[in-house]
Image (cartoon, coloured by chain):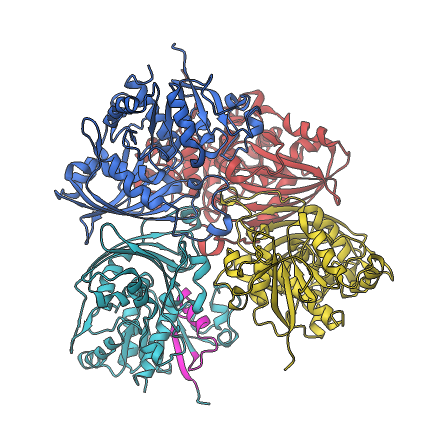
Chain colours: A cyan, B blue, C red, D yellow
């Protein structure tokens, strides 16, 4: 049995940091040995520094680790990152410069032209931009990012339709409160309510989707030319972002052909049997009232996107619903799967 | 002081029937003197026959009325109707045949070519189809209907845009549980969840909107030629249907022109100061996170539609949010305002 | 028509401050002319300084007032107070020293022996401690307080039972999120959940109840000798604190006698027809599943306590449920009613 | 490897029936081979007859079984039962008469003097009443029952305190909606609300607790002489019943002694390592705001009772919170653990 690869977490005490700790419990390849957080937490045991907000108890393997300052020094080579946007740019770059592989859930580097915005099933070839990134920035290390939690659901659901030529997409989200971190959304704001606004979310969904579905063209990533419009809403659901999607395609498949394209969609993570890859990244639910966040979001360990209600759209061509687990497939699990893909590509060697 | 007009309610013990009873409390023109329900309830006092489900106590003026069978006989001329779809066609027609003015919230007659599907601010002239209805069916009475609760929000919000030429509309709803009556949605289905399906709702929103925004052409109502696509979802909110709307227009106004068109929109009910008419049927909220169902839906006595977040849509032309009170503006209040309009037109004489 | 009495609010931008502004809209005696808040807000218009969190729009009469620093200077004589516990002691005392009548919702002075902890229907005679307070502290002004939001529900529900001799009380609360202010309880904590802890709440309920139900004995208030035990829980309800109560009495009345004692309970505020006094401070609901917060809490303008399910307790003597509106009867409305009582006693002369 | 014991489910299509199907997936001893339901369902495949309401998909091993009429004939010897109270008495007795071992979650036989009301950790010796039951009723088979879902939480939490002499107990519950089955509680009733009434629940908690904590005295079960008072409330939580408990004891232990008694509590199921037995049936959580239903109820596979906030009670002696999973520890899991205990006692031979 091979020794596990040591990994560190930047922003370990925050909500996504906690999700990393939870998701990596018992991971067959990776083992958390290093936790970094703000200076305020540094020096304390993780169990003291962290108000654990996830269901169940804090994993025992991290509870007794000491929280470090977010400096490269003796941190492991592979670093998962999720820190506040105001500080994360400098920290991630410092780690990349010092030779670390930074797999980031933060938004700061996502739209940089030389940084892959990765969904392993959708655009694994975007990793080829990394050498350019290293050359251009003079880094021994590297930064790869995963998309915003709502973008992942949309982009993964659209990926099997790329073959039909995606022209236009209108997406309306109903997003879970866990997407806002902790304390996040005030209960006085969301209890029995809908908030029709999430700061910068629509812009992120629109531009990130184009980049993810774009093509790697030798020395740059060419965004998909499709038009994308998003309306983002917060609803009183704990986990799981729902997206109502209408899409216009160049070629008009029959409904069964579209369902087959979604259901059989599979890519590098499935072929290589990456530990966190769902057997089927997209699962089409035939019942007329699915997917539903509370009932479906935990299936497939939170790593699949659930799709349903595919039907003709009187305005564009097709409409359907998609659901994904925002803190797993949309955050911690997304980054871990990215790291697994990068490992399988030899990028961690 | 003029004596009030006596009114009756068909389906008085159901949820919408209760809302009629609540909404008509203290109405300046109308007074409930007759309550009809299924044979099971007939003969009992309303307070015995009715499991009161609305906030607060049952209005005293109806509690002591005896529930009648739903037969025209000695019922008042003006009847509000809201009964189960399986029986309402025959009952409403029997009343209309017997000379009653039936103002219905039920869906059965809405799409009949000779029945007005009325929103007083939007298509008051559709009442002109009534003489045709009476002639064709040999009725002394008449039937007028109000739209489905989610349609009203969409159609009223779109009405001020008709002048710009509405071509295509995509609407995604987030609808309150009260829209499903009582017991309606099981708490096990909706608690912390979203249900992406409401039976027949999408079809109703699409076709009713076209009829409402259509034109009266002498002897028929010509539906608006715009394409409409709806995706309907149930969310854990008590009252208030939210609709995320994208719209394509023939003429492209500037945003301020559109906001002005909405904010100054006004019609017959406002000119005639009908008792249930809101001073402004559409209220544009400038805050970036409004409207919100729990915070806005009770304003203006639940009779206005609240609109916000108007902005450019990268796919169609504009996108925005609309909110309306589904059991008031979308049901009981809608029918009462219809009756007020009909009274002001002399149709109750 | 008499000119209205000018009033000021200390802590006007906070949640309870907003509730004062809302509750005092159209008040027949009092008119808000002065708003005080932290230095950060001072100088701004109220509409700029305040993130309005209550349903509906900010009242027009306060929106255009300028926020002041919390210094007595030119503030009105009658001041409502609701500020953060860390600063309120000094500020309230400064105002009282300067001759103001401070009617406080804050907790800091509640348990001071020379400060009345007032529920106008329960212990109006506790106001007689005020001269002692002024003498002892050398104040021209004065401070009166209202109880904690959950205490008010319990103490008001118990008041009619005092005649039977209250020996022991066990109370378990289910408290609304609005009781924690804004942002207050994180939605990630309370959505679909119960939190079995509210800081210091149990201690407050236990000791405040004894003081309120105690007797004024010439120069001090003697707390009621009854034992009180509270368990406080937060539940996902917007407004309305529910309390499950078991009580042991010296004399054992029959159930109808107890219900009559509650239903007919009435006191100074009712006799003097104080503007905010509910006609019946306690309303007994005979249905077996009432009171319910969402359905009952807004009745009687939020100023009554609703009681139901009175029955024998196998351990103590009786058990029943009580409900009160925590931000109205339990906060802003409580303080306003206190001020009305004080005015009717001539304490504002 | 031994062949598994075949088991059947009476009432397989209902909510608890579905929970049996889910809980028994992959059980090391038992295998579902027979599903019974009402005549309406009989003859259909389970997947057709059943509206699956639980999270995730229907287990594959039951989906293809044909639903049978509830007649003993060729059903397996070991039967789990959960049917409507109106029919279950006759059906369970018919099966017991025919030699089946009926392990019932239904309430009908719970309080029969010759039927064990079993919590394996609390009163395993009550199984000794079975021979009397068989003799008295002339049965080859037998019936054993598990308590009501809220009773289990209370009785299990109290069990370790029995050694100190339980005199009086006051319990106030906050119960999850899943306790009411499907469709169960209407969302219009419970959304953002508390319902202070659950039919017959208080009576069941009071009497069942006394029976469970009672002693087997050779030929009868003598209920515990303690007085128990319950107030039962429904709250908008999906799974997990919370109970606020005050208890009076004959001997007054120190708090650490009580915590130790709870934390180390262990009994036959633990000693025998029954497959569904939690390693520790009671887990004391030291945080001041735990247990919480959404965060704790799924721990230990839903089979432990979580206790917290133990402190002195000013009225009785001690107060604390307890939480249990109402559909697992309080229903399906309870019955399965009962069957495991019975198997380990040789009662299935």
Q: Hey, which residue is sitting farthest left in the picture?
A: B251
- Examine the structure image and report whether residue A22 is included in the region drawn in magenta: yes
Image side of residue C313 versus residue C301, left or right = right
- Residue B292, given in percent of the width and then of the height, sits at 35, 43
Using the image, determine if residue A211 lies above or below residue A178. Answer: below
Pick whichever, D74 or B342, lies toward us: D74
Using the image, determine if residue D74 lies above or below residue C139. Answer: below
Question: Which residue is at 25% across, 69% downward?
Answer: A109
Image side of residue C320 versus residue A33, left or right = right
- Residue D71, given in percent of the width and then of the height, sits at 67, 58
Question: Which residue is at 39% across, 79% downward?
Answer: A7
Q: Which residues are magenta?
A: A4-33
Image side of residue C44 versus residue A48, left or right = left
Using the image, determine if residue A94 lies above or below residue B197. Answer: below
Question: Which residue is at 33% across, 70% downward?
Answer: A264
Determine if residue D111 is in view. Answer: yes
Quadrant of the image for the C terminus of chain A? bottom left
- Examine the structure image and report whether residue D184 is included in the region drawn in magenta: no
């Amino acid at each position: 049995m091979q020794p596990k690869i040591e990994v560190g977490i930047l922003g370990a005490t925050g909500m996504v940091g906690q999700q990393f700790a939870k998701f990596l419990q018992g991971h067959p390849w990776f083992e958390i040995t290093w936790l970094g957080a703000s200076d305020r937490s540094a020096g304390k045991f993780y169990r003291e520094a962290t108000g654990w907000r996830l269901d169940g108890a804090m994993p025992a393997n991290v509870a007794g680790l000491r929280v470090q300052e977010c400096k490269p020094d003796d941190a492991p080579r592979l670093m998962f990152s999720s820190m506040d946007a105001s500080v994360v740019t400098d920290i991630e770059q410092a780690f990349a410069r010092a030779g670390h592989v930074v797999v980031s859930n933060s938004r700061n580097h996502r739209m940089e032209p030389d940084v892959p915005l990765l969904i392993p099933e959708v655009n694994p070839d975007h990793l080829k931009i990394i050498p350019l990134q290293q050359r251009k920035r003079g880094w021994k290390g590297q930064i790869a990012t995963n998309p915003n939690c709502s973008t992942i659901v949309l982009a993964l659901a659209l990926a099997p339709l790329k073959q039909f030529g995606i022209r236009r997409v209108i997406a309306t989200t109903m997003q879970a409160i866990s997407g806002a971190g902790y304390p996040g959304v005030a209960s006085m704001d969301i209890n029995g309510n809908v908030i029709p606004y999430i700061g910068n979310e629509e812009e992120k969904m629109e531009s990130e989707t184009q980049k993810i579905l774009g093509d790697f063209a030798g020395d740059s990533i060419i965004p998909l030319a499709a038009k994308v419009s998003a309306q983002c809403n917060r609803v009183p659901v704990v986990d799981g972002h729902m997206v109502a999607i209408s899409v216009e395609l160049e070629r008009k498949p029959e409904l069964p052909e579209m369902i087959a394209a979604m259901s059989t969609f599979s890519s590098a993570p499935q072929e290589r049997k990456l530990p966190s890859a769902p057997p089927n990244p997209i699962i089409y639910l035939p019942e007329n009232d699915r997917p539903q966040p509370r009932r479906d979001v935990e299936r497939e360990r939170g790593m699949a996107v659930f799709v349903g209600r595919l039907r003709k759209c009187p305005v564009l061509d097709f409409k359907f619903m998609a659901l994904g687990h925002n803190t797993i497939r949309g955050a911690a699990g997304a980054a871990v799967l990215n790291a697994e893909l990068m490992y399988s590509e030899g990028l961690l060697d």
